[in-house]
Amino acid sequence: DAKTTQPPSMDCAEGRAANLPCNHSTISGNEYVYWYRQIHSQGPQYIIHGLKNNETNEMASLIITEDRKSSTLILPHATLRDTAVYYCIAGNTGGFKTIFGAGTRLFVKA
Amino acid sequence: EAQVTQNPRYLITVTGKKLTVTCSQNMNHEYMSWYRQDPGLGLRQIYYSMNVEVTDKGDVPEGYKVSRKEKRNFPLILESPSPNQTSLYFCASSPPGLAGVRSTDTQYFGPGTRLTVL
């Protein structure tokens, strides 16, 4: 898995978009970008993943730069329940060695 | 309901007393993993398994054993627990990818087991 770099913490106002950046400059051509989140001490929860193209699902959007060296997770209308630690992983997380970094602690404030 | 279950959810034990944390998934997933999570250190992989009878070490395997005799179960065994194994433990499973290709599918995590070793 490629190394990822994320800011340690971010704030966002409730109802506004939360944009969480991730740098993965050493990502290889066949490695995906995954985002998980962990609310308090619950098990991490999958959010979204992508290879080259931007992706959107019911939870979030993923924007990957053309050179694939960085990406942004977008929560379009953050709520208080989105307060969590968000992990960006560059690799293939199908059960092989998976490296979770420190993640970004997102605080959504009323 | 598709899920990963762990038991027990909470356990307080003493140094040296063997214990097993069970993990079971009902999604027929080939891949399963164990992680531990400690403050300031994030999630670290202990062991993973690619299928029945196939296991390999993660980043922090010392002091742990695993077995995979059935597809659905992946127990974590601490033969002689020590206080430095006090942690929050997560089991995860994921489906396989195409033959010979690492899976691009996601991992599904259990609710966690909080272990305290005195």
Image (cartoon, helix red, strand yellow):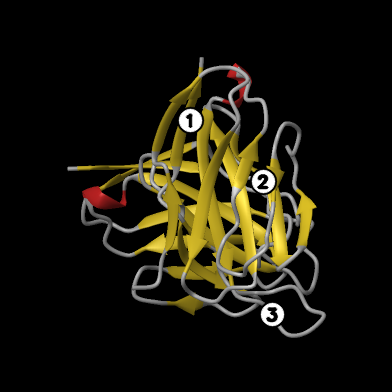
Residue A61 horizontal/vertical position (percent):
44, 70
Q: Is residue B37 above or below residue A17?
A: above
**Mark 1 highlights which residue?**
B115
* Closer to us: B39 or B117: B117
The image's mark for residue B97 is 3
Badge 1 density bin: few <14, some 14–19, many ≥20, Cα 10 Å: some
Amino acid carrying mark 1 in the image: Leu
**Mark 2 highlights which residue?**
B45
Q: CA distance from mark 2 to mark 1?
A: 16 Å
Badge 2 density bin: few <14, some 14–19, many ≥20, Cα 10 Å: many
Q: Earlier in the sequence, mark 3 or mark 2?
A: 2
- On the picture, is B45 further left or further right than B117? right
Q: Residue at x 62, y 25 (%)?
A: B81
Considering every residue shown, the one lying at the far bottom of the view is B98
Which marked residue is nearer to the observer: mark 1 or mark 3? 1
Q: Residue at x 28, y 56 (%)?
A: A78
Q: Quadrant of the N terminus of chain B?
A: bottom left
Amino acid carrying mark 2 in the image: Gln
Q: Earlier in the sequence, mark 1 or mark 3?
A: 3
